[in-house]
Image (cartoon, helix red, strand yellow):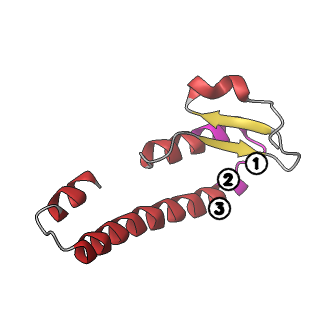
Amino acid sequence: MTNELESCKEDPAPDKLLRGVRISIQEHLNRLDSALSTGAQEIRATLNDGEGIRELLKRLYERNSEVVDVSFIDSDSILRFIYPEEYVYVEGEWIV
């Protein structure tokens, strides 16, 4: 996204700059939305497989550089799994 913003610096017209930034942000949000939708569908097949869930979270994280972490929270609001592993200490916590 930085490259897109750099290319807009050459054009002093604010409306063109804002349009370019908006389009770039929307493209990133669309990609994240698609990845999360696919992940939600895939997770249904792994609900009883903790290692399968961990692998799915890892793939989602690695394919989406914009995110800080990805997690699986169960229907009781318990954070069951999280990636990257540096946040594993919060697994088992109740998420309000």
For mark 3, does the 10 Å Cα neighbourhood hold few (<14), some (14 to 19), or many (20 or more) residues? few
What range of the chain is rendered magenta?
A: 43-55
Q: Position of residue 59 (x, y in %)?
A: 50, 44
Quadrant of residue 95 in the image?
top right
Quadrant of residue 83 in the image?
top right
Q: Are marks 2 and 1 in contact (CB under 8 Å)?
A: yes
Residue that carries the numbered disc 3 in the rendered image: 41
> Quick one: SS at disc 1?
loop
For mark 1, does the 10 Å Cα neighbourhood hold few (<14), some (14 to 19), or many (20 or more) residues? few
Residue furthest right as drawn:
76
Name the quarter where the C terminus is drawn: top right
Instruction: Tell me if 16 is positioned left or right of 90 in this view.
Output: left
Amino acid under disc 1:
Leu
Amino acid under disc 2:
Ile
Amino acid under disc 3:
Gln
Q: Is residue 54 magenta?
A: yes
Q: Position of residue 44 (x, y in %)?
A: 72, 56
Instruction: Tell me if 5 is positioned left or right of 53 in this view.
Output: left
Q: Position of residue 15 (x, y in %)?
A: 27, 77
Q: Are marks 3 and 2 in contact (CB under 8 Å)?
A: yes
Magenta-highlighted stretch: main secondary structure? Answer: helix
With respect to residue 90, does 62 lie above or below? below
Q: Residue at x 15, y 69 (%)?
A: 12
Which labelled disc corresponds to residue 43?
2
With respect to residue 42, does 73 lie above or below? above
For mark 2, does the 10 Å Cα neighbourhood hold few (<14), some (14 to 19), or many (20 or more) residues? some
